[in-house]
């Protein structure tokens, strides 16, 4: 088997994991080490630079003796050696292999029963066992170990192009955060399905949606997201709020691709994800004692819930229900299902009115955790704000309150918290949270040496956490969407919104792939705000610039154009196309 395997890798053969109707291509890529250090007689520490899911080949070459060598795979180091007793689910494995003269030897870790049996997402048997590792320790090698004698075979999505997306700003730490998160998405495509991490290798709806957002910021191909969607329709998971995120996934696919054929094929299944079976006569979702104990998740792990008080009417669960109804109404409209549009719209109106009446606390200007409690948690407010459920006159207070609370939720909730802040004029606070000192930010991951984002902010917050969890990579989508400021306004990116949120930054440039081609944005802010925009053929853009104090006009190519001021934005009245330079004066 090893000879076939090695020749397949050398030839770049792609294999398709059996993941359902939509099967993305995942390729094994041969990688050389970035460094090899002799740490003891006959013991070499090999560094591949970043963690990836894969295995190894050893190529003795002119080493002709037959020796048994010990190979240790690890995600972590301790005292300059591969950590053989890492914390939680941090990966370590060891295997002994016999060298056979000059013959190349395939080396894979032992099978891990926890993530290689159904319902785990399985990788092709012909690849051998894959494990996430950066470091390899080779003990018993009979001579010097050279870089041309060891290769990692890392599994990645074949459509991913490393430099298709870029991000550069005036904040070096923010750039490192983007790079960490962007690479995290690439590295976790190994299974052909968005999985939660290596501990379980399961698809979960929340993980999948958050990963989908970040994946689209680096690769416009929808196949992995669709393969994940198919799997989750077959193997749904248990949390209450996870089901509506299937609607979010379908809506995101439609906005990314404009493909109504795929939407039509999955539309009826989406109706089962609205939590309708739990809706009472007033339009709100109800929770039984069992659902309160087990289903209503709010945030994970449990101690990241900011003291959330669970009741039979849960504000977070209902926020997800309302957002899903809004998305479903638009999806029904796209498919010409007028009766469903009317039905979903009426459900949303009824539930929205009750939501405001029963869950908003006018005395504090905040949302309660649920009916029957006066506790106002971070989560009861961040989700309504992120989902556009908060009336316009109440948004500034809630946004300011959230910004003042800091990162009082998990890396999962951070996606929605930062969305809420960016959408509500608190972009400086959102950026500050990404790079904040302490152990509850992506800066902490960067400074800890992570090369793939973690499942939680730190080991002490989730002792069994994975060190390869894509749901922790939110800046990979938030920075392109809000700081570069590029999002689709119409399905398939026929019309985009360009709306930079600068925070305290003074300069940003970057590009992102879209289904229509590369989109690039660069902006600088000093006395004026200058933006250079290049759109691919077939795309136009509505442009909104942050209104600087004292600005009075907007120019395109040096000539004034019609624009009007709406709150904190200058909005150009005509869409733009091609390559243009825009200046606010």
Image (cartoon, rainbow, N blue to C red):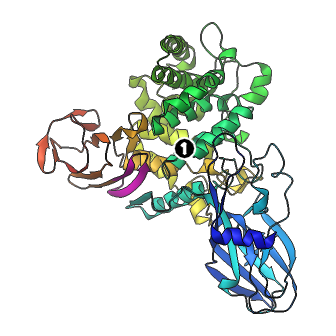
Q: Is residue 147 magenta?
A: no
What residue is pinned by disc 1?
A: 222
Residue span colored magenta: 504-520
Q: Is residue 306 visible?
A: no
> How far across and down, in percent of the image, does residue 221 sit?
52, 47
* Magenta stretch secondary structure, dominant: strand
Residue at (72%, 39%) from the top-left corner? Answer: 302
Instruction: In this rendered view, identify the residue nearer to me: 386 or 18.
Output: 18
Name the image quarter holding residue 487: top left
Name the image quarter holding residue 499: top left
Residue at (72%, 19%) from the top-left corner? Answer: 287
Instruction: In this rendered view, identify the residue nearer to me: 201 or 228.
Output: 228
Q: Is residue 513 magenta?
A: yes
Residue at (80%, 23%) from the top-left corner? Answer: 290
Q: Is residue 32 visible?
A: yes
Name the image quarter holding residue 131: bottom right
> How far across and down, in percent of the image, does residue 471 sit?
62, 47
């Amino acid at each position: 088997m090893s000879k076939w395997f090695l020749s397949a890798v050398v030839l770049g053969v792609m294999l398709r994991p059996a993941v359902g109707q939509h099967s993305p291509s995942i390729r094994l890529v041969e990688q050389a080490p970035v460094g090899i250090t002799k740490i003891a007689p006959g013991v070499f520490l090999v560094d591949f630079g970043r963690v990836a899911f894969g295995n190894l080949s050893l190529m003795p070459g002119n080493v002709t003796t037959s020796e048994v060598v010990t190979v240790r795979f690890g995600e972590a180091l301790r005292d300059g050696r591969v950590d053989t007793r890492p914390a939680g689910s941090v990966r370590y494995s060891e295997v002994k292999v016999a060298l056979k003269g000059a013959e190349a030897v395939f080396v894979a870790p032992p099978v891990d029963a926890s993530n290689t049996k159904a319902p785990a997402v399985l990788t092709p048997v012909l690849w051998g066992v894959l494990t996430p590792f950066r470091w390899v320790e080779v003990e018993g090698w009979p001579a010097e170990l050279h870089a041309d004698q060891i290769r990692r075979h890392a599994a990645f999505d074949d459509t991913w192009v490393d430099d298709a997306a870029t991000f550069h700003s005036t904040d070096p730490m923010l750039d490192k955060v983007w790079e960490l998160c962007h690479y995290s998405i690439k590295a976790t495509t190994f299974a052909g399905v968005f999985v939660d991490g290596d501990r379980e290798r399961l698809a979960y709806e929340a993980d999948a949606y958050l990963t989908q957002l970040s994946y689209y910021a680096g690769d416009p191909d929808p196949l992995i997201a669709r393969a994940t969607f198919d799997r989750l329709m077959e193997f749904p998971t248990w949390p209450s709020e996870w089901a509506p995120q299937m609607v979010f996934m379908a809506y995101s696919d439609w906005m990314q691709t404009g493909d109504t054929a795929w939407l039509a094929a999955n539309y009826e299944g989406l109706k089962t994800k609205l939590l309708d079976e739990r809706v009472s006569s007033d339009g709100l979702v109800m929770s039984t004692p069992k659902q309160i104990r087990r289903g209503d998740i709010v945030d994970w792990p449990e101690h990241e819930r900011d003291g959330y008080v669970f009741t039979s009417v849960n504000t977070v669960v209902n926020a997800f229900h309302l957002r899903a109804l809004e998305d479903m109404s638009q999806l029904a409209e796209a498919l010409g299902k007028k009766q469903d549009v009317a039905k979903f719209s009426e459900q949303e109106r009824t539930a929205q009115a009750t939501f405001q009446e029963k869950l908003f606390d006018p005395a504090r200007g905040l949302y309660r955790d649920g009916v029957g409690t006066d506790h106002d948690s971070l989560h009861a407010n961040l989700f309504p704000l992120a989902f556009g459920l908060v009336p316009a006159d109440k948004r500034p207070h809630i946004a300011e309150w959230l910004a003042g609370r800091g990162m009082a939720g998990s890396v999962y909730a951070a996606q929605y918290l930062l969305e809420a802040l960016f959408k509500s004029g608190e972009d400086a606070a959102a950026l500050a949270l990404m790079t904040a000192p302490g152990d509850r930010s992506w800066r902490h991951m960067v400074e800890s040496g992570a090369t793939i984002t973690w499942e939680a902010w730190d080991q002490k917050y989730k002792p069994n956490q994975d060190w390869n969890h894509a749901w922790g990579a939110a800046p990979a989508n938030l920075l392109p969407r809000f700081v570069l400021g590029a999002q689709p306004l119409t399905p398939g990116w026929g019309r985009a919104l360009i709306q930079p949120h600068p925070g305290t930054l003074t300069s940003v440039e970057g590009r992102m792939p879209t289904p229509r081609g590369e989109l690039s944005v660069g902006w600088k802010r000093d006395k004026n705000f200058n933006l250079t925009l290049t759109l691919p053929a077939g795309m136009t853009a509505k442009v909104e610039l942050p209104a600087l104090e004292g600005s009075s006009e907007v120019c395109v190519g040096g000539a004034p154009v019609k624009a009007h001021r709406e709150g904190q934005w200058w909005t150009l009245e005509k869409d733009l196309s091609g390559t243009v330079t825009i200046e606010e004066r």
